[in-house]
Amino acid sequence: MSLEAIRYRRGSLEILNQLLLPQQSLYEAVGSVRQGWEAIRSMKVRGAPAIAIIGCLSLAVELHNKTTTEESVDNLETFVLDSLSYLVSARPTAVNMAQAAQELGRIVRQEAKREGSTVESLREKVICWAEAMLDQDLKDNRSIGDHGALHLLQQVGQDKVIVLTHCNTGSLATAGYGTALGVIRSLHTMGCLEHVYCTETRPYNQGARLTAYELVYEEIPATLIADSMVSMAMKEKKISAVIVGADRVVANGDTANKVGTYQLAIAAKHHGIPFYVAAPSTSCDLSLEHGGQIIIEERPSQELTDINGVRVAAPGIGVWNPAFDVTPHDLITGGIVTELGVFAPTELLAALTRRANKV
């Protein structure tokens, strides 16, 4: 059974505080949009799908618990739209929250203009949409896992594979199951996974703290390595494929993911190892033509200079701490895995366009 990072029932939301893992498993209540923003910004919750889910559910919980009887449809519409804009500002690189805000905002405007619309109907519309988002993400993750596992096995031509992954892309980063880690989970369930190598993912150590925690929890055979060991691992450990997640995939197939991904892709290309990116279609941003247009979040310097609040870097040194990097599409040699299937980066735009035209 995979970890439960999100506990939700109508009117109540709790998140597993990922800042405390793996030493402590503590669920914290999120009862408002402001608390949702703070949980996302502080990285108590992280991972592109989870950011959007927690953001929208925090809004749903606050709406459910609002008791004022003097509110109008117009005021509620303004509150929801302002709340969505606020939530998008928490972390700009992951596109899922922005996409969710755009879609939910469109629905809210339509409902507010509908003849006979009431405060209750508008509130219910928002809550139901957020709840459906939670269920859909879990369904999409399972599809990503199965599509990716089958494609990877076919491409490498092996009965058992050894994979390398970066950062955390499992149940802790999604509604459950995971994206890149979902593919690994599917391979394990099929009996086709020999071993996993996961990076520590400096400077925030999502791999060492979170991915390693999930792998141990589910008894998946795995080894933790430093980020600086990936090239050596590819050379010495018979890596069959590399699979990572993405916080944003743009129209030409370039992807933004946790910093360190780009160098993994370069090393994989040098060693002739297929490099996969796994992400739901909600992480695809077709409004941007190429990765150079992606806004890269920069994190506080203390994340690099300090460990558990203790300064380890020389005082006075300058710090550059981008949270993400961009992998060019031509380095994604295995493909981009979505709930719709696995596509070459140059094919993804057409696939998503076909899907959009059917909806």
Image (tube, rainbow, N blue to C red):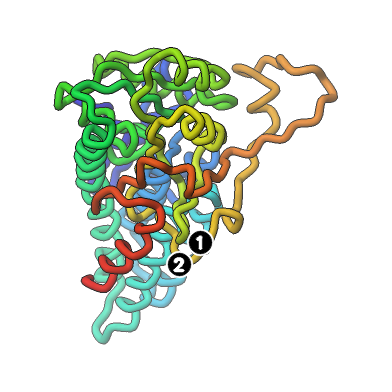
Image quadrant occupied by the N terminus: top left
Residue 280 to residue 118: above or below: above
Q: In this figure, which residue is indicated by the disc labeled 2?
A: 81
Crowdedness of circle 2 by 10 Å Cα count: few (<14), some, many (20+)? some
- Local SS, label 2: helix
Q: Quadrant of residue 325?
A: top right
Q: Position of residue 283 (x, y in %)?
A: 40, 52
Residue at horizontal 71 percent and vertical 16 percent from the top: 311
Horizontal arrangement in the rendering, residue 247 relative to residue 202 (left or right): left
Q: Residue furthest right?
A: 316
Residue at horizontal 16 percent and vertical 25 percent from the top: 189
**Amino acid tagged 2:** Leu
Q: In this figure, which residue is indicated by the disc labeled 1?
A: 85
Q: Residue furthest left?
A: 190
Horizontal arrangement in the rendering, residue 335 relative to residue 36 (left or right): left
Q: Position of residue 174 (x, y in %)?
A: 33, 40
